[in-house]
Image (cartoon, helix red, strand yellow):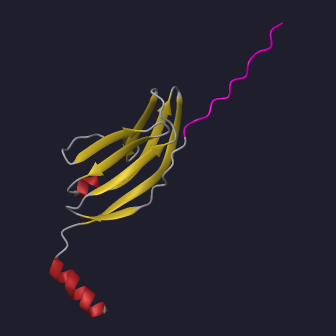
Amino acid sequence: MVPSKLVLKSLPDILFRLRNQSVVQGSVIWFYCKVNSSSHTLRIMWNKNGGPLVQDAPHIRLRMTNTSSSTTLLLVLDNVAPSDVGLYQCSVQEGEDIVTGDTLNLTGYYNIDITTVIIILCISY
């Protein structure tokens, strides 16, 4: 009888921890999802509010980079709008296995009047 071979499979790790962010309307914000794998079967995805992130506007951009030991999927939101507010999460799929990262809550400040900001700063100083 030939002994069976035990194969241990390690799942990729998401290397960056996401933190909640607040952003001003019209600004640019970016999030990294870096994984300690450069496998060709690796699939990195950004999710928003529990579902796949839909690139339904020109201000949402994704850029993937690879090194010999890692893969990074960068999410860039140019000219942030109220519709960008929500819960973001990175997930990695390799074969049938899925690893999900932390959830980031993106909140926004919209239509801030710069005069009001200056008055608040002067009063609080």
**Toward which corner of the image does residue 106 lie, by quadrant?**
bottom left
Q: Quadrant of the N terminus?
A: top right
Residue 20 part of the magenta-drawn span: no
Q: Quadrant of the C terminus?
A: bottom left
Q: Residue at x 49, y 54 (%)?
A: 17
Tell me where residue 120 appears, x and y as whole percent: 25, 86
**Front residue (pair 108, 71):** 71
Left or right? Give the position of 98 relative to 77. right
Tell me where residue 121 appears, x and y as whole percent: 26, 87
| Vertical side of 23 occupied by 50: above or below | above
Q: Which residue extends farthest front?
A: 68
Residue 7 part of the magenta-drawn span: yes
**Toward which corner of the image does residue 122 lie, by quadrant?**
bottom left
Tell me where residue 97 appears, x and y as whole percent: 54, 31
Left or right? Give the position of 104 relative to 96. left
Q: Which residues are magenta?
A: 1-12
**Toward which corner of the image does residue 44 lie, by quadrant?**
top left
| Vertical side of 73 occupied by 86: above or below | below
| Vertical side of 98 occupied by 96: above or below | above
Q: Residue at x 58, y 35 (%)?
A: 11
Q: Residue at x 40, y 50 (%)?
A: 32
Tell me where residue 4 appears, x and y as whole percent: 76, 15
Q: Residue at x 74, y 18 (%)?
A: 5
Q: Principal SS element in the magenta part? A: loop
- Count the numbered circles shown: 0
Left or right? Give the position of 111 relative to 12. left
